[in-house]
């Protein structure tokens, strides 16, 4: 463990830049924290804190100058590893024949992700299961993921909608990063405890000539972690969620949710693990050039489950059910663990204030369950 | 015909690229169903498929559709796809002519477990276009007829003119010792065959239930009733296999559209043993 | 046809599976063997219904006349199945035409004879009616599925 000063952090970022990485990190824009390209540590939002609640987000000024005093906003790292729009291939027609040029995996400068939270580290691991570890890896994802340098930041102040501790995905990051920083802002001192998580992370830290961490620094950090662990205001109820697809599959509670859910798909857009996509064909006006594009899709769209003759999931009720049961139950069948990392984004960004933890609890905690057991 | 494919980094082959193939022949089976025979060219050698698998068929400038392969797995120089004209891509395919070029990628999906049928009676039950992914099974069984006991094909269609592969159905009955019973929902006086639902045909064949392996494919409701009937007659449920359909967009497990409860139809399906999906079939709007 | 042969034929027909020996004797009195050539009309829509057929071999097509389209065949009855129960229900008239699609052999049971025996022996009547009810139920289920037109996708119903 080393200790970096503000200059040390600036140096860390500029070293990465000089090594050819494109820095992506939190920036302040339009009243929210937005992931964007950084030119230096000066671009990081200084002295801001987030207030997050179901359907509500705002930034408030902190009493200190912390650079990472917020948690996660509507952006997740998903949009860099698995871009919202990707050209899969370009095709050119000549006579009756056509040629295909692959386009997914086109190289660009590798990314260095600055400020990745533990929940988002886990989310990347989950996306790996979809795009990297299956029978047909996605070439673009594999390349971007392999090249990405990850500088994680330990969460010491969970937000109002966070519930990573109940999903065992945080608040403390224990792996999956090249470097992990813990910000210590204490009176006049502004330091970062830095831990190397990989060989290249350790090498980079060594090159910054930072001083080694002393027991005081570590103690301060531990104090923050301990406090963080006590701060969570919500949790995913523990226990087996499979009744949601079993005995409660046609429960009246789904109708309650359907009355509130707008099927707006915000939750799927902000979720760091939602991976559904659709594929589209575009042509130019001459009809001799076509492109095949993949773009993010959402199971909340009406046509998501279309088969010849109609849509299988015809109502908001069944589409919400599909989303939550895929996230909490079927992900386990498909990939071995739940697809939810407890980041709280779906709760914050839902205009109808629907809370995934509350809905899960409504089904599996018997005291809360509605007495209406009629099927929809 | 050139297919220039640039190398992809990290040695990962791009699963979304389509290979151009030539349309050799088009047969209209009925008013809205046609079979394309595709010349695989120099892809014929490396391309191998198992009965029940499907390809993603690509129309330049329009898009892709998942279509089961309905030809003989032994003959990969020419591939058949029987297509129901029902959406943008399939309508575009319906307008293609001999000599036109379309794209293919595949094969994808699970296949009918033909090994499970060795030494047993095989009952193939299909309705409408459901016979298409089962035709490769019949070819495979007929090729080694002695390995199987009875082979029964039960097939239902809307009307006599809607039936697929009419000539072959007769050929199977006459030349391959395959009991073939065909029924339609309605017909005119020139139709001398059965009229009624395909499950009604079970009345005319005495199934040796415990010795029977069943492959079922057709509209989901038809498969539901068929499965009930097979159960009623004592066919063990792990001897019954179905081919399920959902919205297949990528065929490689990314897009999430084909999910049927916990399973991706493009990965674990489309062919499933009944015990795996029976509980899922009971759930409405899954 | 010898009575013993007819008894055996009756005993072998699936419709009468489990029928008691005593009731079989009652039935025998109404039974005779019949054979229809291919394309023979067995009965016509509107005619008086007075026979209950147990089909042994071949196939009978049920037709309804569709003005403008001719006769449409909406059902076939095959070996082991039964044809017609209008003899049981007033006004005892056929609701469709029955034609032998191929050469067909059946046991014909006289309708009036059956009705009288059902009335005088309620145990016998119950046995016959119970079996008929089962046939009607399975016929209804099949008809419902045929009604769904599950193989046909009507283009106007397909949403793009």
Image (spheres, coloured by chain):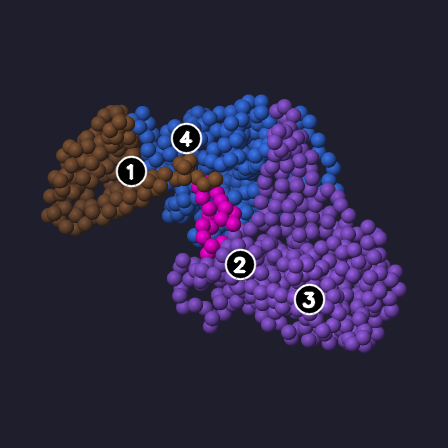
> Which one is in front in this view, the residue at disc 4 or the one at disc 1?
4
Image location of residue C68, percent across then percent down: 26, 27
Residue closest to the eye, A152 or A285: A285
Q: Residue under circle 2?
A: A324
Which quadrant holds the N terminus of chain B? top right
Query: In the picture provided, is A65 more to the left or to the right than B267?
Result: right
Q: Residue at x 42, y 28 (%)?
A: B31
Reading the image, the residue beneath label 3 is A70
Q: Position of residue B75 (x, y in %)?
A: 58, 28
Report the residue marked by disc 4.
B163
Please give the range of residues in magenta: A301-325
- The mark lying in front, picked from 1 and 3, is 3
The chain in purple? A
Instruction: Name the mark nearer the viewer: 3 or 4.
Output: 3
- Chain corresponding to brown in the figure: C
Q: Residues within 10 Å of mark 2 (few under 14, many from 20)?
A: some
Q: CA distance from mark 3 to mark 4?
A: 65 Å
**Secondary element at tag 2:** helix
Q: Which chain contains the residue that carries disc 1?
A: C
Mark 1 or 2: in front is 2
Q: Which mark is residue C80?
A: 1
Does the residue at mark 1 contact the one at mark 2 (Cβ under 8 Å)? Answer: no
């Amino acid at each position: 463990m080393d200790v970096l000063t503000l200059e040390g952090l600036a140096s860390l970022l500029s070293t990465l830049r000089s090594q050819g990485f494109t820095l992506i990190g939190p920036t302040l824009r339009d009243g929210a924290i937005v992931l964007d390209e950084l030119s230096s540590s000066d671009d990081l939002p200084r002295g801001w804190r987030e207030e997050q609640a179901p359907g509500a987000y705002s930034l408030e000024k902190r009493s200190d100058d912390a650079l990472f005093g917020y948690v996660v906003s509507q952006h997740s790292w998903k949009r860099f590893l698995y871009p919202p729009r990707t050209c899969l291939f370009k095709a050119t027609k000549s006579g009756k024949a056509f040629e295909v040029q692959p386009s997914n995996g086109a190289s660009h400068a590798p990314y260095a992700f600055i400020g990745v939270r533990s929940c988002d580290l886990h989310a990347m691991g989950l996306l790996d299961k979809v795009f990297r570890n299956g029978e047909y890896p996605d070439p673009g994802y594999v390349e971007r993921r392999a090249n990405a340098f990850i500088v994680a930041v330990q969460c010491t102040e969970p937000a109002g909608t966070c519930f990573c501790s109940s999903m065992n995905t945080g608040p403390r990051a224990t792996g999956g990063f090249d470097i992990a920083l813990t910000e210590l802002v204490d009176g006049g001192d502004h330091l970062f405890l830095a831990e190397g998580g990989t060989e290249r992370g350790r090498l980079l830290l060594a090159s910054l000539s930072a001083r080694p961490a002393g027991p005081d620094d570590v103690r301060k950090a531990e104090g923050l972690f301990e406090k963080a662990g006590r701060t969570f205001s919500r949790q995913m109820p523990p226990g087996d969620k499979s009744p949601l697809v079993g005995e409660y599959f046609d429960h009246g509670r789904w109708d309650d949710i359907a009355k509130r859910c707008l099927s707006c798909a915000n939750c799927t857009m902000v979720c760091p693990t939602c991976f559904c996509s659709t594929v589209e064909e575009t042509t130019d006006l001459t009809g001799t050039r076509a492109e095949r594009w993949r773009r993010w899709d959402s199971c909340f769209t009406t046509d998501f489950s279309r088969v010849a003759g109609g849509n299988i999931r015809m109502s908001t009720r069944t589409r919400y059910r599909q989303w939550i049961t895929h996230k909490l139950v079927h992900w386990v069948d498909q990939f071995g663990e739940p697809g939810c990392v407890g980041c709280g984004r779906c709760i914050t960004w839902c205009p109808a204030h629907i809370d995934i933890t509350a809905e899960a609890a409504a089904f599996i905690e018997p005291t809360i369950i509605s007495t209406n057991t009629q099927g929809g | 015909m050139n297919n220039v494919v640039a190398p992809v980094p990290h040695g990962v082959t791009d699963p979304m690229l389509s290979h151009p193939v030539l349309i050799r022949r088009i047969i209209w089976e009925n008013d809205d169903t046609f079979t394309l025979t595709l010349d695989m060219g120099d892809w014929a050698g490396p391309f191998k498929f198992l009965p029940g698998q499907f390809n993603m068929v690509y129309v330049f400038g329009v898009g892709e559709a998942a279509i089961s392969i309905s030809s003989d797995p032994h003959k990969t120089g020419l591939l058949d796809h029987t297509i129901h004209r029902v959406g943008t891509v399939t309508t575009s395919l319906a307008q293609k002519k001999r000599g036109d070029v379309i794209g293919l990628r595949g094969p994808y999906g699970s296949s009918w477990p033909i090994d499970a049928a060795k030494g047993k009676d095989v009952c193939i039950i299909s309705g409408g276009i459901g016979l298409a992914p089962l035709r490769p099974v019949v070819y495979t069984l007929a090729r080694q007829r002695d390995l199987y006991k009875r082979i029964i094909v039960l097939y239902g269609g809307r009307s006599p003119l809607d039936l697929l592969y009419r000539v072959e159905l007769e050929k199977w009955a006459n030349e391959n010792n395959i009991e073939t019973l065909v029924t339609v929902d309605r017909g005119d006086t020139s139709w001398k065959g059965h009229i009624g639902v395909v499950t009604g045909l079970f009345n005319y064949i005495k199934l040796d239930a415990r010795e029977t392996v069943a492959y079922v494919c057709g509209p989901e409701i038809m498969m539901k009733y068929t499965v009930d009937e097979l159960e009623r007659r004592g066919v063990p449920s792990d001897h019954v296999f179905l081919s399920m359909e959902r919205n297949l967009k990528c065929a490689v497990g990314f897009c999430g559209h084909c999910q049927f409860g916990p399973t991706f139809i493009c990965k674990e399906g489309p062919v499933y043993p009944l015990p795996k999906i029976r509980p899922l079939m009971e759930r409405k709007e899954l | 046809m010898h009575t013993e042969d007819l008894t055996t034929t009756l005993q072998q027909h699936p419709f009468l599976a489990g029928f008691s020996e005593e009731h079989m004797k009652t039935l025998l009195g109404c039974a005779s063997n019949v054979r229809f050539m291919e394309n023979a009309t067995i009965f016509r829509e509107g005619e008086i219904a007075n026979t209950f057929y147990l089909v042994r071999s071949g196939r009978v097509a049920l037709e309804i006349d569709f003005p403008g389209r001719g006769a449409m065949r909406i059902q076939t009855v095959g070996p082991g199945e039964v044809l017609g129960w209008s003899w049981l229900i007033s006004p005892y008239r056929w609701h469709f035409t029955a034609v032998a699609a191929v050469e067909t052999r059946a046991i014909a049971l006289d309708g009036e004879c059956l009705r009288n025996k059902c009335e005088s022996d309620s145990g016998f009547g119950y046995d016959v009616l119970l079996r008929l009810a089962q046939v009607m139920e399975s016929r209804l289920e099949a008809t419902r599925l045929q009604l769904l037109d599950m193989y046909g996708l009507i283009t106007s119903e397909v949403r793009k």
